[in-house]
Amino acid sequence: MIVLGIDPGSHVTGWGVIESSGSKLRHLASGTIVAQGESLAARLVCIAAGLEAVVARFSPQAVAVENIFHAKNSRSALQLGHARGVALLVAARSGSTIHEYNPTQIKQSLTGRGRADKMQVQKMVQMVLGPLGTLALDASDALAAAICHTEMARSGAAIASAERGPAA
């Protein structure tokens, strides 16, 4: 199964694609989408185009999206919500099943601690998937979401948060 993990952000959105075969996980690709543009609308268009390209390249069966846990202020939360909405829309249009996980769930599944910092998560991602070279924190967070989903799916705890969307 190919799983796309997404760590949404209104300025930088991380993404990571892994392949799960039994208990083996393999890193296929990961990166960040740096949203260009002054307006939120322009940045959302950039995020959508970047995620659409990833989906077209890898055709994931499942997409794991990180939920909003907290934001610095209400404006940040609103902008993050818009970025998540774009990620969910792209995933739904792809026909993939969509799964949403809280940051604490993702951290717990990878590190055993729900309050692990980003560097601890990144180190565990590299331990699970092997050395990946220089990896942006947003990309490692997205890979962590994908890994979390494979763990939840193995244990039977994964529940699709949205119906499978129409195939694009």
Image: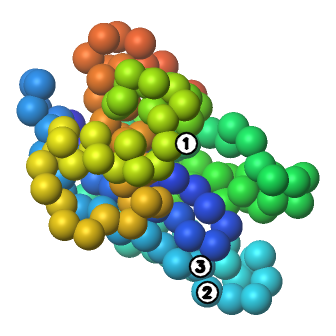
Report which quarter residue 134 is drawn in.
Answer: bottom left
Residue farthest along the right direction in this orientation: 74
Tell me how many marks there are. Answer: 3
Q: CA distance from mark 1 to mark 2?
A: 22 Å
Q: Quadrant of the N terminus?
A: top left
Residue 126 location (% of width, % of height): 22, 49
Image vertical order of residue 162 relative to residue 11, above or below: above
Q: Secondary structure at mark 1?
A: strand
Residue at mark 3 = 35
Q: Which residue is mark 1?
A: 66
Do callouts 1 and 2 mark residues in contact (Cβ within 8 Å)?
A: no
Horizontal side of 80 relative to 126 (left or right) equals: right
Apparent side of residue 139 relative to residue 84 in the rendered image (left or right): left
Which residue position is annotated with label 2? Answer: 36
Which is more toward the observer, 165 or 69? Answer: 69
Q: CA distance from mark 2 to mark 3?
A: 4 Å
Q: At 48% from the left edge and 73% from the top edge, which residue is drawn?
A: 33
Residue type, numbered disc 1: Glu
Say above or below: 149 vs 37.
above
